[in-house]
Image: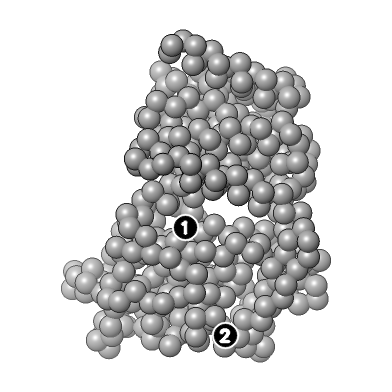
Amino acid sequence: MKAVMYGGGNIGRGFIGMLFSMSGYEVTFIDVAEPVIEGLNREKKYPVRIVSSEGHEDIEVTNVCAVNGNDQEAAAEAIAEADIMATAVGVNVLKYIVPNLAAGIRKRMQRQGGPLNIIICENLLDANKVLEGMIKEKLTEEEASWFEQNIGLVEASIGRMVPVQTEEMKAGNPLRVCVERYGFLPVDKAAFKGGIPEIQNMIPFEPFDFYIRRKLFVHNMGHAVCAYLGLYTHRDYISEAIEDPCIQNIVQNAMLESALALSRAYGVSVEPLIRHFQDLLMRFKNRALKDTCSRVGGDPKRKLSPTDRLTGASLLCLENGIYPVFISVGTAGAVYEYIRESGEEQSMEKARQVLGTIACLEESSPLWFYILPFYQRYMDGVSVREIMDFAEKMRKQEQKEVV
């Protein structure tokens, strides 16, 4: 059995490629990083280290090789021969791998190959529709028809946290990846074409939309709120930030807001959602991961977009009668970080511009009322405790007005 893992980075090697190998597949990674390609082809294996605050466990991933994504013929050949495939390249890179995907699908069709399911491991709502549109632009009408019948674009919810790998984490082996123990892979059961392959820790769900939004609006959102408060208080690591009782209080309340909104939107019990984010709070405290606030808070522009973790979660809250007060603390932090990274002077005028052009919020949106007062407090340099106290006061006021 053959598997293709498009993306030999942290998630590719540290999670999905590992599951493929453990499930009995010969795994071919497609990447453009020469050291990774050369190392995988030389060693035919690589180490994964599962780390926690209590210690670590080493696992050897075997039966692997790699091809260079710049070699379209080699990449297409691997895709044409695969029994299962996954992508983990990052949202902004997806468009660059589409020509190789189309070439592999075309070659597969010409050989009258069977169905191929591609597990999409990207933090992107409706990733299957986005990728389908990009691939079909490269196909003829006949090829597109074959694609629709034979290629399953399967959304996945990536819960495993894998930080940027430092030299200390690599411990002398550039192929080593350090990860947390959590290793479940929920996927969209309805999207598979043909039979569903048996892959260790892969859990098919239907309908899957709920799980995508749970990951984005609870896990990713809470992670981002923690990161921006960590950056604001000059913490290097997520584990340091979440140990601050005030930051933990804000993150927990933000997750609760999303959990309540998801519960109402999908008609599910809120108790499992609460247990889920309580588990996440404990996982954020994993010091051995050394996950940085700068990594988790990176690309604030994308995180502020209307369908992403901050604005998207807030809009879902409003749609379901929940006040996204604590989520707005993180949104204001993202606005503050975006302006700082842009090298521009912090100002209320600039913040309003960001909310309008990046978050795509009308000035009549209640979110302006929630976000801008917190942004003002970031500008004023007040303590996190003062931000938390103001958030609690604002939420009580909102609840009082409704009553």
Q: What colour scheme was applied to this rendering of the protein? A: one colour
Secondary structure beneath label 2:
strand
Which numbered dot is residue 157?
1
Q: Is residue 249 above or below residue 203?
A: above
Give the image location of residue 65, x and y in percent: 56, 85
Element type at marker 1?
A: loop
Residue at image location 66% in from the left, 81% down from the top: 60
- Locate residue 72, reporting x and y percent: 44, 79
Quarter of the image holding residue 43?
bottom right
- Please identify the quarter of the rendering in which residue 111 is found: bottom left
Image mark for residue 64: 2
Q: In this orientation, which residue lies closer to the viewer: 251 or 337?
A: 251
Question: Vertical placement of 137 versus 300: above or below?
Answer: below
Q: Residue at x 36, y 55 (%)?
A: 208
Query: Which is more N-terminal, label 1 or label 2?
Result: 2
Residue 374 image position (x, y, % from top left): 62, 22
Q: Residues within 10 Å of mark 1 (few under 14, many from 20)?
A: many
Q: Which residue type carries mark 2?
A: Val
Regarding residue 401, the answer to whether it shows in the image is: yes
Instruction: Name the residue nearer the viewer: 143 or 364.
Output: 364
User: Closest to the observer: 233 or 244?
Assistant: 244
